Amino acid sequence: MAIKIKKRGLPDKIPIDMTPMIDIVFQLLSFFCMTLRVSEAEGDFNIKMPLAAPRAGAPDPNLVPPIKIRMRADPATGNLVELVINESAGGINFSGANRWANLNKHIRDNIGEGSLAAATEVELDCDYALKYEYVIEAITAVSGRVTPTGEVVKLVEKIKFSPPRQDTP
Amino acid sequence: MKIKAKGPDYVEIDYTPMIDMTFQLVAFFMILINFSEGEQDQRVQLPSSALAKPPDAPLEVPITIQLVQDGRISMGDDKLYPTAESIRPLLSNEKYVLESQGRSIEDATIVIRAHKDVKTGQVQKVIKVCQELKFQKFSLRAKSETGY
């Protein structure tokens, strides 16, 4: 009589059902796909603007006078109609499609891209109704330029605003 | 002669690569996900600038002020404030919180995200209110123009 001896112990392979795990992973993937928001890259123009105290005594003769940029707007649309630099000293008007490039060139030709540019201050005097995008274009034009190789060459770093003009009805 | 009956053939598909790819996608989205929606109001269309590059390091203490097209102001909550004066209490509160944490107001940076069509005078009024509360550092945010 043959006696069969059954092997006791764990089987060689334990089947694990992976289906719930894969379900949860797909749930997570759906969640992340729906909550992902692709936003455009944003950059900053850093400006330091303390509320300046009145200066005591005579102004420092070594300080370079600020370059004043006057920007006039059409009161109805807010579009830029006039861009003038140093208006009180004769003024140079920039107009046309290339006005920002011309303004940038003027700054570079008169100040250069060295230490004088770092010491120079630009004051923006804008009409109340002027669209904000023109302010950013002005700041871009005076802050530097991007070379054809993609390098950023900095120009003026000190920028301030004139006191806000009253809103004309 | 025996004829073996052939039953239906079962084809076993190996799902391992698909599961690997799924895990890769989950990991990718987990790294990318950004829950800070309060700092980017979708109503604000920023002006673009070729020189606007993302900062190298995150700002120490950023306080974001957003101006929508009609000049109303948002400060991270759902409410829109009509004028610059109406956010003065909020800014004073931010200043108080900073000082209670032992930090200087000079560490704070006011980040202004203004719509490209908003009136400049309205932005200047916001800046003036911040200056009156002794905030000194400002960041004007613009959309980065890519050269691709």
Image: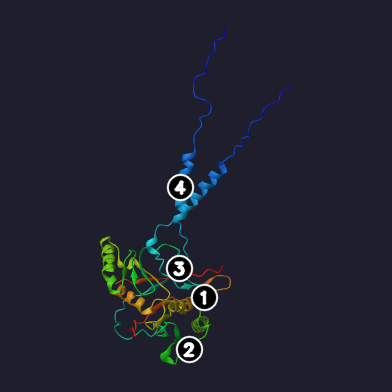
- Quadrant for the C terminus of chain B, please: bottom right
Residue B32: give x, y in percent of width and height: 47, 55
Q: Is residue A69 above or below residue B79?
A: below
- How far apart, in angstroms, are the residues tagged by discs 3 and 4? 35 Å
For mark 1, does the 10 Å Cα neighbourhood hold few (<14), some (14 to 19), or many (20 or more) residues? many
Q: Where is mark 3, residue-wise? A: A43
Circle on res. A47: none
Give yes or no for contact between labels 3 and 4 (Cβ–Cβ under 8 Å): no
Q: Which of labels 2 and 4 is toward the front? A: 4
Q: List the single residue furthest toward the right.
A: B1
Mark 2 chain = A
For mark 2, does the 10 Å Cα neighbourhood hold few (<14), some (14 to 19), or many (20 or more) residues? some
Q: Earlier in the sequence, mark 3 or mark 4?
A: 4
Mark 1 chain = A
Q: Nearer the viewer, residue A106 or A21?
A: A21
Q: Which of labels 4 and 1 is toward the front? A: 4
Give yes or no for contact between labels 3 and 1 (Cβ–Cβ under 8 Å): no
For mark 3, does the 10 Å Cα neighbourhood hold few (<14), some (14 to 19), or many (20 or more) residues? many
Q: Where is mark 1, residue-wise? A: A145
